[in-house]
């Protein structure tokens, strides 16, 4: 009798949960933080893109993430059921430096890393802020909290005038709703892949300030600045929508050096193609972290970090996508060890920048 009662109770709770989900789900996913799907003229432009096929954006050669229960079981055995617990987060708060970014010297070049894939480039006074996530890297703040000590910087700490806000794709850990709200009135241009402008417009960004780009598009910014939109091997999506916006890496061609701003993504032939097309990359900023063998097509596994750098032919390397969030089943500091391995195995000129530090760049020699 007790067992039967428990079964009825459990089933009742499941039914209640499903009913609540059915009622509240559509309301929740229409909250502003989830953005807005492309529509109208933007959707028409997307439909004309050679990278938009079968109703969604695709990687080169249609590479995609394929789920495998066999791989999933292997990963669970390897990580979840290990006797030794994986240190996904640091035991102690990390020491993050904090500097005045509003008065960086305009006659030199600087890089400031805020953890994960958020960083600021100040190139002779021209500011480029990439994938800033200063508020939350998830739809709701309790879902994905930053490591203790890594939240020293706020949107208000950024330069008073931001020349370029660059967004590589619309995942929450790269496009932060609340951060955009607090920065948008200080930004001259937002550079982003096709479709991402739909989110930005819903959040109040002036459409005249948005530069939406397809792979191989070039934005001539004047004063000898050019921004080239380039492929990445990844995916996109917010709420229940997936791959209705594009993902991209970018090449900044400036009088002070050429910088490859990589997007999340797996290793593929596009790195070598980019290296051949642009043989003078002074600095490449590459993903290194939040990987798993299940995600090999769309995130860089450690053995391929050096391969990417070599294929690009970059003179200097900086890695990002680590040291702030635990999004994968690897030790939080393993990416730092990957840097050491890549430097030793491939002889890379790899620059290690501390959290929050202002590192002066020497791009051209």
Image (cartoon, rainbow, N blue to C red):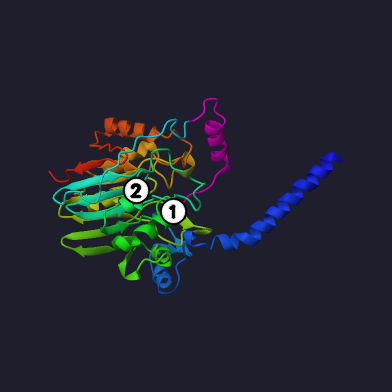
Is 200 left or right of 228, judged from the image as shown?
Answer: right
The x, y position of residue 114, in whole percent, is: 33, 44
Give the vertical position of 58 relative to 70 (above or below): below
Reply yes or no: does residue 335 show up in magenta: no
The x, y position of residue 348, in whole percent, is: 24, 36
The residue range painted magenta reads 64-86
Reply yes or no: does residue 72 show up in magenta: yes
Residue found 13% across the figure and 50% down from its top: 107
Is 45 left or right of 255, judged from the image as shown?
Answer: right
Give the vertical position of 76 relative to 214 (above or below): above
The x, y position of residue 118, in whole percent, is: 34, 48
Q: Secondary structure at mark 2?
A: loop
The x, y position of residue 155, in whole percent, is: 35, 53
Q: Which of 6/42 is in front?
A: 6
Give the vertical position of 55 relative to 249 (above or below): below
The residue indicated by pointer 2 is 118
Is 24 left or right of 209, judged from the image as shown?
Answer: right
Q: CA distance from mark 1 to mark 2?
A: 13 Å
Q: Residues within 10 Å of mark 1 (few under 14, many from 20)?
A: many
The residue indicated by pointer 1 is 171
Give the vertical position of 45 relative to 298 (above or below): below
**Upstream in the sequence, badge 1 or badge 2?**
2
Q: Foreground mark, 1 or 2? A: 2
Residue found 47% across the figure and 59% down from its top: 33
Figure quadrant of residue 179: bottom left
User: Is there any visible trace of residue 74 in the rendered image?
Assistant: yes
Looking at the image, the residue that sits furthest to the right is 1
């Amino acid at each position: 009798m007790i067992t039967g009662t428990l079964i009825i109770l459990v089933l009742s709770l499941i039914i209640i949960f499903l009913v609540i989900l059915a009622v509240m789900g559509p309301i929740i996913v229409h909250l502003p933080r989830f953005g807005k799907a492309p529509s109208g003229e933007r959707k028409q432009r997307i439909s004309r893109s050679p990278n938009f096929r079968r109703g969604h954006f695709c990687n080169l050669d249609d590479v995609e993430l394929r789920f495998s229960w066999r791989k999933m079981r292997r990963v669970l055995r390897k990580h979840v059921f290990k006797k030794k617990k994986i240190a996904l987060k640091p035991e102690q708060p990390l020491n993050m430096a904090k500097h005045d970014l509003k008065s960086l010297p305009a006659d030199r070049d600087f890089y400031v890393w805020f953890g994960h894939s958020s960083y600021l480039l100040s190139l002779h006074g021209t500011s480029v802020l990439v994938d800033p996530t200063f508020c939350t890297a998830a739809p709701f703040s309790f879902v994905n909290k930053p490591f203790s000590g890594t939240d020293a910087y706020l949107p208000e700490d950024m330069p008073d005038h931001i020349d370029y806000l660059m967004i590589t794709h619309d995942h929450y850990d790269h496009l932060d709703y609340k951060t955009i709200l607090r920065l948008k009135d200080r930004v001259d241009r937002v550079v982003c892949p096709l479709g991402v402008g739909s989110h930005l417009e819903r959040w109040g960004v002036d459409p005249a300030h948005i530069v939406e780009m397809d792979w191989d598009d070039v934005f001539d910014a004047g004063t000898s600045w050019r921004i080239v939109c380039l492929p990445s091997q990844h995916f996109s999506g917010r709420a229940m929508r997936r791959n209705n916006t594009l993902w991209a890496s970018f090449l900044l061609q400036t009088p002070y050096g050429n910088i490859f701003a990589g997007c999340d993504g797996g290793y593929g032939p596009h790195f070598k193609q980019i290296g051949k097309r642009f043989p003078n990359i002074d600095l490449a900023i590459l993903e290194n972290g939040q990987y798993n063998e299940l995600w090999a097509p769309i995130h860089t596994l450690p053995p391929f970090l050096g391969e990417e750098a070599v294929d690009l032919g970059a003179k200097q390397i900086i890695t990002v996508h680590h040291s702030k969030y635990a999004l994968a089943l690897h030790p939080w500091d393993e990416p730092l060890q990957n840097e050491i391995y890549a430097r030793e195995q491939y002889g890379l000129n790899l620059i290690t920048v501390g959290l929050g530090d202002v590192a002066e760049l020497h791009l051209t020699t």
